[in-house]
Amino acid sequence: MTKTARTTQPLKRDAMKLKKDIAVSETGFIFNPATGDSFSSNSVGLEIISLLKTGKTQKEIIKTITAKYNIKSLEFEKDYDDFISQLNGFNLAEKLRK
Amino acid sequence: MKNMPRRKITVAVTALNAIDSPGPGMAVIRALRASPEFETRIIGLSYESLEPGIYMKDMVDKTYQIPYPSAGSDVLFARLKHIHSREQIDVIIPNFDSELLNFIKIWEKLKQIGISSFLPTLKQLESRDKVNLYHFCQKQKFNTPKDKIIYKISEINKAVEEIGIPFVVKGKFYEASVLNSVEQAQKEFLRLSSKWGAPVIIQEFVNGIEINISAVGDGKGGLLSVVPMRKLYITDKGKAWAGITLGAEDFLDLAKKFARATKWKGGFELELIRSQKNARLYILEVNPRFPAWVYLTVAAGQNQPLSLVKLALNIKTVPYRKYEVGKIFIRYSWDLITDVETFQKISAYGEY
């Protein structure tokens, strides 16, 4: 039997940004004026959103959050992916055009 | 600098039924009262003795009962002429779909005796009628759900087959229900046609977010005001009990396109749905008058009833350019207290 060498490539994630009209308050209240939907985020979610708003890349966000909090990079990446997926699902984020 | 004296005007308003499915009258009155431009005397025009607006003396100065629309435009004109002889009405604002035809028929006669209005033309009224809506939208390239116009119960089976399930059954003027079977549609047809008359409309159901737009057309293809709203809480009658103003260019573009296509004259409401399937905006209905939530437009910075009064009086008006997004209205119920002596004045004498 021939062993097939497997190479594990990291998943290429599209760079994301928050849609420009989305309003976010200091308390984590998020409002989409195009749909009237509103959401609330916890403090870490709010930090991620703030970093997205300033145009930070996924790599930079992961670096910032893992430096500040006691969390491993791999663990945070899973949470980050989940959070971005939620932002997409709620129509709050869009792909960054290169 | 001395304050300029405000111009005194008398405005007659219908739809004082501030009930669980309210008419726009009280919201229109509230909007006019909110404006510092005029010193406004409000004459309420009621159909029923228990319309709450009759008894809201801080809002309505005097109320007169008017005949039901089924009595016809001549009877209506005679009654309004009498009321005008007592009150010297400057502007009249009818707010019920079912009475508009009569008011449109007599607007010139009303103008001749001194009562101004700013109403859609008969052609505009008919073009957006539920019976004609699908063809109107196809012609103007607006998205709208398919529909079937039902005059006889025997037509329902085929209509449901063509439209698909679920579907929406709508009355000629008011009411709409989402239903799932021919039997339900037949029962609803009988109920709606006996209440409002035929035809009844069976419309394709589009799943998505309901959005309403209140606007004022200048009669020349332009808009003086446009404010979109999303319902945050919907009653079992499908009415907005709370709503929030929205900001998105495609809502404003659609309203502008509608005004351009129709040269709409007066207040109107677009009932839309943004399809979950394809994100497109579909026109469900076009109401030829202000919605009951029109006071939200005032709160957001665009006093639509005031614009209408100015158009009626031929006062030059600049279109509104901005409004506040995220403004919320929350409707509430309140028990007004009055007494039988007051009640008997409107029910026995037809005025209070």
Image (cartoon, rainbow, N blue to C red):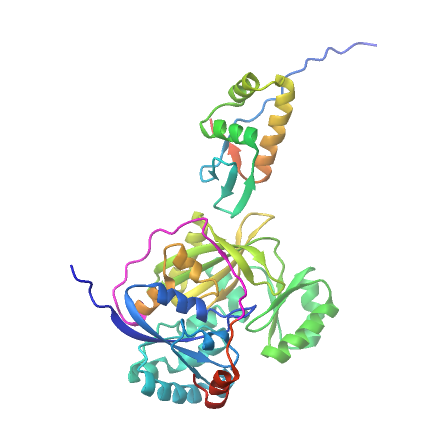
**Quadrant housing the N terminus of chain A:** top right
The answer to which quarter of the image holds residue B31 is: bottom left
Give me the residue at 52% from left, 84% from top.
B340
Relative image position of residue A49 (x, y in whole percent): 51, 31
Above or below, comparing residue A72 to residue B223 in the picture: above
> Would you say the magenta stretch is mainly helix, strand or loop?
loop
Number of labels in the image equals 0
Give left or right: position of B250 versus B6.
right
In the depicted view, which residue is nearer to us: B139 or B73? B73
Relative image position of residue B26 (x, y in whole percent): 45, 69
In the depicted view, which residue is nearer to us: B14 or B64? B64
Relative image position of residue B192 (x, y in whole percent): 63, 75
In the depicted view, which residue is nearer to us: B329 or B346? B346
Q: Is residue A24 visible?
A: yes
The stretch drawn in magenta includes residue B316? yes
The outermost residue toward the left is: B1
Q: Which residues are magenta?
A: B311-335
Give left or right: position of A78 versus A45.
right
The outermost residue toward the right is: A1
The answer to which quarter of the image holds residue B25 is: bottom left
Above or below, comparing residue B352 to residue A68 in the picture: below
The answer to which quarter of the image holds residue B158 is: bottom right
The stretch drawn in magenta includes residue B179? no
Above or below, comparing residue A25 to residue A61 in the picture: below
